Image: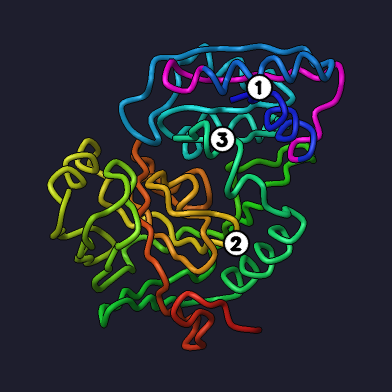
Protein backbone atom coordinates (compact mmCIF):
# COMPACT_ATOMS: atom_id res chain seq x y z
CA UNK A 1 0.00 0.00 0.00
CA UNK A 2 1.22 3.49 -0.86
CA UNK A 3 1.37 5.37 2.43
CA UNK A 4 2.64 8.67 1.06
CA UNK A 5 -0.78 10.33 0.77
CA UNK A 6 -2.06 9.47 4.27
CA UNK A 7 1.32 10.48 5.69
CA UNK A 8 1.17 13.84 3.97
CA UNK A 9 -2.45 14.33 5.10
CA UNK A 10 -1.54 13.69 8.74
CA UNK A 11 1.34 16.17 8.67
CA UNK A 12 -0.49 18.84 6.70
CA UNK A 13 -4.14 18.70 7.81
CA UNK A 14 -3.70 17.58 11.43
CA UNK A 15 -0.33 19.09 12.39
CA UNK A 16 0.04 22.00 9.91
CA UNK A 17 3.72 21.15 9.36
CA UNK A 18 5.55 24.06 7.74
CA UNK A 19 8.67 24.17 5.60
CA UNK A 20 11.76 24.66 7.75
CA UNK A 21 10.21 23.25 10.93
CA UNK A 22 12.03 20.50 12.82
CA UNK A 23 9.94 17.35 12.49
CA UNK A 24 10.94 14.27 14.47
CA UNK A 25 9.46 10.83 13.76
CA UNK A 26 9.91 8.33 16.60
CA UNK A 27 9.17 4.74 15.60
CA UNK A 28 10.23 1.15 16.25
CA UNK A 29 10.83 -1.90 14.09
CA UNK A 30 7.18 -2.98 14.28
CA UNK A 31 5.92 0.33 12.88
CA UNK A 32 8.95 1.29 10.78
CA UNK A 33 7.03 1.27 7.49
CA UNK A 34 4.67 3.97 8.76
CA UNK A 35 7.53 5.86 10.39
CA UNK A 36 9.47 5.91 7.14
CA UNK A 37 6.42 7.16 5.21
CA UNK A 38 5.98 10.04 7.66
CA UNK A 39 9.69 10.89 7.49
CA UNK A 40 9.63 11.04 3.69
CA UNK A 41 6.43 13.09 3.66
CA UNK A 42 7.93 15.57 6.15
CA UNK A 43 10.97 15.96 3.91
CA UNK A 44 8.76 16.53 0.86
CA UNK A 45 6.91 19.27 2.76
CA UNK A 46 10.23 21.05 3.27
CA UNK A 47 10.69 20.28 6.95
CA UNK A 48 13.99 19.44 8.66
CA UNK A 49 12.95 15.79 8.89
CA UNK A 50 14.49 13.38 11.41
CA UNK A 51 13.79 9.70 12.03
CA UNK A 52 14.66 7.83 15.25
CA UNK A 53 13.97 4.12 15.63
CA UNK A 54 13.83 2.72 19.16
CA UNK A 55 13.50 -0.78 20.56
CA UNK A 56 9.82 -1.58 21.17
CA UNK A 57 8.80 -0.68 24.69
CA UNK A 58 7.71 -3.54 26.95
CA UNK A 59 4.40 -1.89 27.91
CA UNK A 60 2.22 1.13 27.21
CA UNK A 61 3.43 4.19 29.10
CA UNK A 62 7.07 3.12 29.36
CA UNK A 63 9.44 6.05 28.75
CA UNK A 64 11.52 6.22 25.55
CA UNK A 65 15.34 6.33 25.78
CA UNK A 66 16.79 9.54 27.21
CA UNK A 67 18.35 10.51 23.87
CA UNK A 68 14.95 10.30 22.20
CA UNK A 69 13.31 12.34 24.97
CA UNK A 70 15.99 15.03 24.46
CA UNK A 71 15.37 15.07 20.70
CA UNK A 72 11.63 15.44 21.29
CA UNK A 73 12.34 18.53 23.39
CA UNK A 74 14.21 20.14 20.49
CA UNK A 75 11.55 19.50 17.81
CA UNK A 76 8.69 21.63 16.53
CA UNK A 77 6.57 18.62 15.54
CA UNK A 78 6.84 15.07 16.91
CA UNK A 79 4.98 12.06 15.51
CA UNK A 80 5.25 8.69 17.27
CA UNK A 81 4.02 5.62 15.37
CA UNK A 82 5.06 2.91 17.85
CA UNK A 83 3.90 -0.52 18.97
CA UNK A 84 3.47 0.62 22.58
CA UNK A 85 2.09 3.95 23.67
CA UNK A 86 4.29 6.96 24.34
CA UNK A 87 1.20 9.09 25.04
CA UNK A 88 1.28 8.91 28.83
CA UNK A 89 5.01 9.49 29.27
CA UNK A 90 7.00 12.31 30.80
CA UNK A 91 8.90 12.64 27.51
CA UNK A 92 5.70 13.48 25.63
CA UNK A 93 4.53 15.83 28.36
CA UNK A 94 7.86 17.68 28.42
CA UNK A 95 7.99 18.03 24.63
CA UNK A 96 4.57 19.66 24.55
CA UNK A 97 5.48 21.92 27.48
CA UNK A 98 8.48 23.05 25.42
CA UNK A 99 6.14 23.97 22.56
CA UNK A 100 6.20 20.92 20.30
CA UNK A 101 3.07 19.74 18.53
CA UNK A 102 2.92 16.02 19.31
CA UNK A 103 0.88 13.24 17.75
CA UNK A 104 1.21 9.75 19.20
CA UNK A 105 0.08 6.66 17.25
CA UNK A 106 0.39 3.68 19.59
CA UNK A 107 -0.37 0.39 17.87
CA UNK A 108 -1.15 2.04 14.53
CA UNK A 109 -1.49 -0.42 11.65
CA UNK A 110 -1.16 0.17 7.93
CA UNK A 111 -4.92 -0.31 7.59
CA UNK A 112 -5.63 2.19 10.38
CA UNK A 113 -3.21 4.66 8.81
CA UNK A 114 -5.26 4.78 5.61
CA UNK A 115 -8.85 3.99 6.67
CA UNK A 116 -11.32 4.21 9.53
CA UNK A 117 -10.97 6.82 12.26
CA UNK A 118 -8.14 8.69 10.59
CA UNK A 119 -10.42 9.60 7.65
CA UNK A 120 -12.99 11.39 9.84
CA UNK A 121 -14.15 14.97 9.42
CA UNK A 122 -11.93 16.34 12.17
CA UNK A 123 -13.76 19.66 12.26
CA UNK A 124 -16.85 17.72 13.37
CA UNK A 125 -14.80 15.50 15.69
CA UNK A 126 -13.31 18.59 17.34
CA UNK A 127 -16.73 20.15 17.88
CA UNK A 128 -18.20 17.09 19.61
CA UNK A 129 -15.03 16.38 21.60
CA UNK A 130 -14.81 19.88 23.00
CA UNK A 131 -18.47 19.77 24.01
CA UNK A 132 -18.04 16.48 25.86
CA UNK A 133 -14.83 17.69 27.51
CA UNK A 134 -16.75 20.71 28.82
CA UNK A 135 -19.34 18.38 30.40
CA UNK A 136 -16.59 16.46 32.18
CA UNK A 137 -14.74 19.55 33.38
CA UNK A 138 -17.93 20.97 34.87
CA UNK A 139 -18.84 17.68 36.55
CA UNK A 140 -18.28 16.36 40.04
CA UNK A 141 -19.21 12.69 39.88
CA UNK A 142 -19.47 9.95 37.24
CA UNK A 143 -21.57 6.79 37.19
CA UNK A 144 -20.85 4.27 34.42
CA UNK A 145 -23.35 1.41 33.96
CA UNK A 146 -23.05 -1.70 31.78
CA UNK A 147 -25.00 -4.95 32.06
CA UNK A 148 -26.26 -4.04 35.51
CA UNK A 149 -22.77 -3.33 36.87
CA UNK A 150 -21.92 0.21 37.98
CA UNK A 151 -18.70 2.11 38.58
CA UNK A 152 -18.76 5.46 40.39
CA UNK A 153 -15.94 7.96 40.76
CA UNK A 154 -15.20 11.60 41.49
CA UNK A 155 -13.88 14.06 38.91
CA UNK A 156 -14.26 17.12 41.15
CA UNK A 157 -11.67 19.77 40.43
CA UNK A 158 -10.20 17.95 37.45
CA UNK A 159 -9.96 19.38 33.92
CA UNK A 160 -10.84 17.19 30.93
CA UNK A 161 -8.64 16.91 27.85
CA UNK A 162 -10.18 17.25 24.38
CA UNK A 163 -8.14 15.07 22.02
CA UNK A 164 -9.49 16.42 18.75
CA UNK A 165 -6.97 15.15 16.20
CA UNK A 166 -6.17 18.76 15.24
CA UNK A 167 -2.84 19.90 16.72
CA UNK A 168 -1.87 23.02 14.83
CA UNK A 169 -0.88 25.34 17.66
CA UNK A 170 2.26 25.43 19.78
CA UNK A 171 2.14 22.90 22.63
CA UNK A 172 -0.91 21.01 21.38
CA UNK A 173 -0.95 17.24 21.13
CA UNK A 174 -2.78 13.95 21.41
CA UNK A 175 -3.43 10.72 19.57
CA UNK A 176 -3.88 10.20 15.86
CA UNK A 177 -6.33 8.93 14.87
CA UNK A 178 -8.25 10.74 17.56
CA UNK A 179 -11.61 11.72 18.91
CA UNK A 180 -11.98 11.44 22.69
CA UNK A 181 -12.56 13.56 25.75
CA UNK A 182 -10.86 12.19 28.85
CA UNK A 183 -10.21 13.08 32.47
CA UNK A 184 -8.21 11.82 35.46
CA UNK A 185 -10.57 10.73 38.26
CA UNK A 186 -9.68 11.80 41.78
CA UNK A 187 -7.36 9.15 43.15
CA UNK A 188 -8.93 6.73 45.61
CA UNK A 189 -12.55 7.54 44.71
CA UNK A 190 -13.49 4.88 42.15
CA UNK A 191 -15.76 2.15 43.52
CA UNK A 192 -17.82 -0.65 42.00
CA UNK A 193 -17.67 -3.02 39.06
CA UNK A 194 -16.76 -2.46 35.42
CA UNK A 195 -17.66 -4.63 32.43
CA UNK A 196 -15.09 -4.25 29.62
CA UNK A 197 -16.44 -5.88 26.46
CA UNK A 198 -14.69 -4.15 23.55
CA UNK A 199 -10.94 -4.40 23.88
CA UNK A 200 -8.23 -4.07 26.48
CA UNK A 201 -4.73 -2.71 25.95
CA UNK A 202 -2.28 -5.59 26.26
CA UNK A 203 -4.99 -8.12 25.42
CA UNK A 204 -6.53 -6.86 22.17
CA UNK A 205 -10.12 -7.42 21.08
CA UNK A 206 -12.01 -9.40 23.71
CA UNK A 207 -13.77 -12.68 22.93
CA UNK A 208 -15.82 -12.36 26.12
CA UNK A 209 -16.25 -9.56 28.67
CA UNK A 210 -13.87 -8.85 31.50
CA UNK A 211 -15.42 -8.10 34.89
CA UNK A 212 -13.22 -5.76 36.90
CA UNK A 213 -13.83 -5.11 40.60
CA UNK A 214 -12.65 -1.74 41.85
CA UNK A 215 -12.26 -0.52 45.43
CA UNK A 216 -10.72 2.65 46.86
CA UNK A 217 -9.62 3.75 43.40
CA UNK A 218 -7.72 0.57 42.53
CA UNK A 219 -8.33 -2.64 40.63
CA UNK A 220 -9.13 -5.22 43.30
CA UNK A 221 -9.87 -8.20 41.08
CA UNK A 222 -10.47 -9.31 37.50
CA UNK A 223 -12.41 -12.18 35.93
CA UNK A 224 -12.61 -13.30 32.32
CA UNK A 225 -10.30 -14.12 29.39
CA UNK A 226 -6.91 -12.49 29.85
CA UNK A 227 -7.55 -11.41 33.45
CA UNK A 228 -4.28 -12.88 34.71
CA UNK A 229 -2.34 -11.29 31.87
CA UNK A 230 -3.93 -7.91 32.61
CA UNK A 231 -3.10 -7.97 36.31
CA UNK A 232 0.45 -9.11 35.55
CA UNK A 233 0.97 -6.15 33.21
CA UNK A 234 -0.43 -3.69 35.75
CA UNK A 235 1.59 -5.19 38.59
CA UNK A 236 4.86 -4.30 36.87
CA UNK A 237 4.35 -1.08 38.87
CA UNK A 238 3.17 -0.64 42.43
CA UNK A 239 0.80 2.03 41.09
CA UNK A 240 -0.35 0.08 38.04
CA UNK A 241 -3.78 -0.74 39.46
CA UNK A 242 -4.71 2.92 39.97
CA UNK A 243 -7.91 3.98 38.17
CA UNK A 244 -6.24 6.58 35.98
CA UNK A 245 -8.68 7.76 33.34
CA UNK A 246 -12.25 7.90 32.14
CA UNK A 247 -12.70 8.79 28.49
CA UNK A 248 -15.56 9.13 25.99
CA UNK A 249 -15.12 8.31 22.30
CA UNK A 250 -16.31 10.88 19.75
CA UNK A 251 -15.19 9.64 16.32
CA UNK A 252 -18.00 8.20 14.19
CA UNK A 253 -15.56 6.68 11.69
CA UNK A 254 -13.65 4.68 14.31
CA UNK A 255 -13.97 0.88 14.19
CA UNK A 256 -13.48 -1.94 16.70
CA UNK A 257 -10.12 -3.32 15.60
CA UNK A 258 -8.58 -4.73 18.76
CA UNK A 259 -6.10 -1.85 18.81
CA UNK A 260 -7.06 0.53 21.61
CA UNK A 261 -5.70 3.53 19.68
CA UNK A 262 -8.76 3.31 17.42
CA UNK A 263 -11.18 1.41 19.66
CA UNK A 264 -11.24 4.04 22.42
CA UNK A 265 -12.19 6.70 19.85
CA UNK A 266 -15.41 4.94 18.75
CA UNK A 267 -18.42 7.19 19.19
CA UNK A 268 -20.72 5.55 21.74
CA UNK A 269 -17.98 3.99 23.85
CA UNK A 270 -16.45 4.82 27.22
CA UNK A 271 -13.00 3.69 28.27
CA UNK A 272 -11.42 3.36 31.68
CA UNK A 273 -7.64 3.13 32.10
CA UNK A 274 -5.39 1.93 34.87
CA UNK A 275 -1.93 3.12 35.87
CA UNK A 276 -0.34 6.49 35.13
CA UNK A 277 -2.35 9.71 35.05
CA UNK A 278 0.43 12.19 35.84
CA UNK A 279 0.56 13.46 32.26
CA UNK A 280 -3.03 14.76 32.18
CA UNK A 281 -3.91 16.14 35.59
CA UNK A 282 -3.54 13.25 38.03
CA UNK A 283 -0.94 12.54 40.67
CA UNK A 284 0.13 8.95 39.95
CA UNK A 285 3.32 8.06 38.06
CA UNK A 286 3.26 4.38 37.20
CA UNK A 287 5.18 3.77 33.97
CA UNK A 288 2.20 1.80 32.65
CA UNK A 289 -1.18 2.89 31.26
CA UNK A 290 -3.73 0.35 29.98
CA UNK A 291 -7.19 1.24 28.64
CA UNK A 292 -10.31 -0.93 28.57
CA UNK A 293 -13.12 -0.10 26.13
CA UNK A 294 -16.79 -0.43 27.11
CA UNK A 295 -19.28 -0.69 24.24
CA UNK A 296 -22.66 1.10 24.36
CA UNK A 297 -22.90 1.84 28.11
CA UNK A 298 -25.03 4.28 30.07
CA UNK A 299 -23.17 7.25 31.56
CA UNK A 300 -24.26 9.80 34.14
CA UNK A 301 -22.54 13.05 35.17
CA UNK A 302 -23.79 14.46 38.48
CA UNK A 303 -26.85 12.24 38.16
CA UNK A 304 -27.77 13.52 34.68
CA UNK A 305 -27.70 10.89 31.95
CA UNK A 306 -25.43 11.97 29.08
CA UNK A 307 -25.17 8.61 27.28
CA UNK A 308 -27.83 5.94 26.80
CA UNK A 309 -26.77 2.61 25.27
CA UNK A 310 -23.85 4.44 23.70
CA UNK A 311 -25.87 7.34 22.29
CA UNK A 312 -24.77 10.79 23.40
CA UNK A 313 -27.69 12.84 24.70
CA UNK A 314 -28.17 16.58 24.34
CA UNK A 315 -27.01 19.14 26.80
Q: Quadrant of residue 65?
A: top left
Q: Is residue 144 magenta?
A: no
Q: Is residue 232 above or below residue 178?
A: above
Marks 1 and 2 sit apart, C-alpha to C-alpha, by: 25 Å
Quick one: 213 or 298, which is closer to the camera? Answer: 298
- 139 lies left or right of 75: left
Residue that numbered label 2 is attached to: 252
Please give left or right for residue 257 compared with residue 23 in the image. Answer: left
Proximity of marks 3 and 2: CB atoms separated by less than 8 Å: no
Q: Give residue 98's position: percent from left, percent from top.
A: 69, 30
The reply to whether dot 3 and dot 1 touch (C-beta < 8 Å) is: no
Report the disc number at residue 104.
Answer: 3
- CA distance for labels 3 and 2: 20 Å
Q: Secondary structure at mark 1?
A: helix
Name the one closer to the observer, 73 or 213.
213
Q: Residues within 10 Å of mark 3 (few under 14, many from 20)?
A: many
Identify whether 201 is placed above or below 66: below
**In the shown orientation, is residue 104 left or right of residue 272?**
right
Give the image location of residue 170, x and y in percent. Answer: 77, 37
Q: Where residue 38 is drawn, which disc sits there?
A: 1
Q: In which quarter of the view is residue 22 placed?
A: top right
Disc 2 element: loop
Boundaries of the magenta span: 14-32
Amino acid sequence: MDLSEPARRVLDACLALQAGERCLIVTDREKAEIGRALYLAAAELGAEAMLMEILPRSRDGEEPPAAVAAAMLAADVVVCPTARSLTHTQARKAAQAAGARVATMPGITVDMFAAGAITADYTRVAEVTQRVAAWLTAGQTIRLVKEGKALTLSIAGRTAIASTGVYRERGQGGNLPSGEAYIAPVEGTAEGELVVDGSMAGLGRLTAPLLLRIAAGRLAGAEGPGAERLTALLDTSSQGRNVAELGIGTNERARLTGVVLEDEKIAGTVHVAFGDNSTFGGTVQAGVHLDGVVLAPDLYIDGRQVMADGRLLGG
